[in-house]
Image: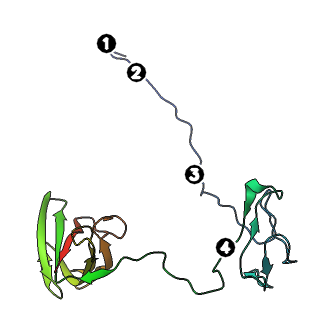
Amino acid sequence: MLRAGFLCVLLLVPAVPTTAQQFDNFDGTSTFDDFQLDSGDGEGTGLTLSEDGALLPDNGSGDIQLNLGDGGSQGTFESFPGVTGPVTSVSQPATEQGSVVTLRALDKMLGQPTDVELSMGQTVVFGRIAIRAIECRYPASDPGGDAFAHLEVLDLEGNSLFDGWMIASSPALNALEHSRYDVWVLRCTA
């Protein structure tokens, strides 16, 4: 018996089958639509396919040419110079080495950011992690412009949580992955 003022609703939800996501596999025999790679006859891609399927530049200019369409100008990449030569940096500004790095450490549970200054080789304990400054650099032309710091972060049991370079202008590029703590570089000074 139902009492007045109450409504009984029964929802039937169909079961959704759970399946793993499928990915396309390419075994080398499939071709993409409008994508052709010739066997290196001197016309077309400028590449040769080795027996194991690797792409090798043809002997000659050393440039790689890749035709992505029907030969029209819309789908053609041509001449990637320097492929067979040594790879060089596009531009790397001159840097100077700093002696002090300023970091900001955040305890996410407490919501408390703390600025920490470390000399090279110095270690500080912040909550349940230890942060060690190994090296820091800054642009010679603009000392306040950016900072690059090589840091090592360990938990109190000695397990490595982070060992690498952090960049002040791009803190998410190479960040500490920790559920409670966050650390990023603010500046590097001489």
Is 112 positioned to the left or the right of 73 in the image?
left
* Closest to the observer, 60 or 150: 60
Q: Which residue is mark 2?
A: 8
Q: Is residue 5 visible?
A: yes
Q: Which residue is mark 4?
A: 80
The answer to whether marks 4 and 1 mark residues whose Cβ atoms lie closer than 8 Å is: no
C-alpha separation, residue under disc 3 versus residue under disc 2: 30 Å
C-alpha separation, residue under disc 4 versus residue under disc 1: 76 Å
- The image shows residue 2 at horizontal and vertical percentages of 36, 16
Q: Amino acid at mark 4?
A: Phe
Mark with earlier residue (2, 4): 2
Q: Name the residue located 27 percent from the left edge and 69 percent from the top edge.
A: 146
C-alpha separation, residue under disc 3 versus residue under disc 4: 46 Å
Mark with earlier residue (1, 3): 1
Question: What colouring method underlies this structural image?
Answer: rainbow
Q: Amino acid at mark 1?
A: Gly
Q: Which residue is mark 3?
A: 18
- The image shows residue 57 at horizontal and vertical percentages of 74, 81
Q: Which residue is mark 1?
A: 5
For the N terminus, give its image quadrant: top left
Mark with earlier residue (4, 1): 1
**Quarter assignment of residue 5:** top left
The answer to whether marks 3 and 4 mark residues whose Cβ atoms lie closer than 8 Å is: no
Q: Amino acid at mark 2?
A: Cys
Q: Is residue 160 visible?
A: no
**Quarter assignment of residue 36:** bottom right
